[in-house]
Image (cartoon, rainbow, N blue to C red):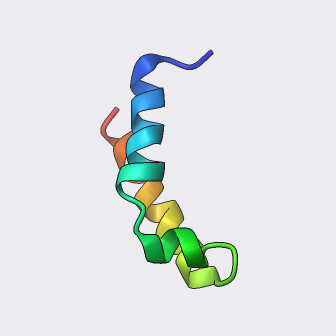
Amino acid sequence: MFSADQLIAHAVGDFLLQSEWMAREKTKRSLAALVHCLTYILPFLLL
């Protein structure tokens, strides 16, 4: 089961913090995917 704070962290990490470059390149380049992953987990570290 997901909690509200987890859903908010997901929205922040996957939508608000993700740049256009990350969204465009994360399926093409390993560096972009790594940067996306590291950025995505930041809000979860605050939980």
Q: Is residue 21 above or below residue 19?
A: below
Residue 19 horizontal/vertical position (percent):
40, 68
Q: Residue at x 54, y 68 (%)?
A: 23
Above or below: residue 3 compared with residue 16: above
* Drawn side of residue 34 relative to residue 41, left or right: right
**Can you say which quadrant of the picture contains the C terminus?**
top left
Nearest the camera: 34 or 15? 15
Instruction: Pick the quarter of the image with the N terminus.
Output: top right
Please name the residue shown 49% across and 17% down the image: 3
Q: In the shown orientation, is residue 22 left or right of residue 16?
A: right
The answer to which quarter of the image holds residue 31 is: bottom right
Check the image and report above or below for 16 versus 24: above
Q: Is residue 28 left or right of residue 24?
A: right
Numbered label tally: 0
Q: Is residue 12 above or below residue 23?
A: above
Q: Residue at x 54, y 78 (%)?
A: 32
Name the outermost residue toward the left: 46
Residue 43 location, quadrant = top left
Which residue corresponds to the image point at 64% horizontal and 81% vertical from the top-left?
30
| Relative to 15, 30 lies left or right | right
Q: Tell me where residue 25 appears, x and y as whole percent.
A: 59, 79
Q: Position of residue 40 (x, y in %)?
A: 46, 54
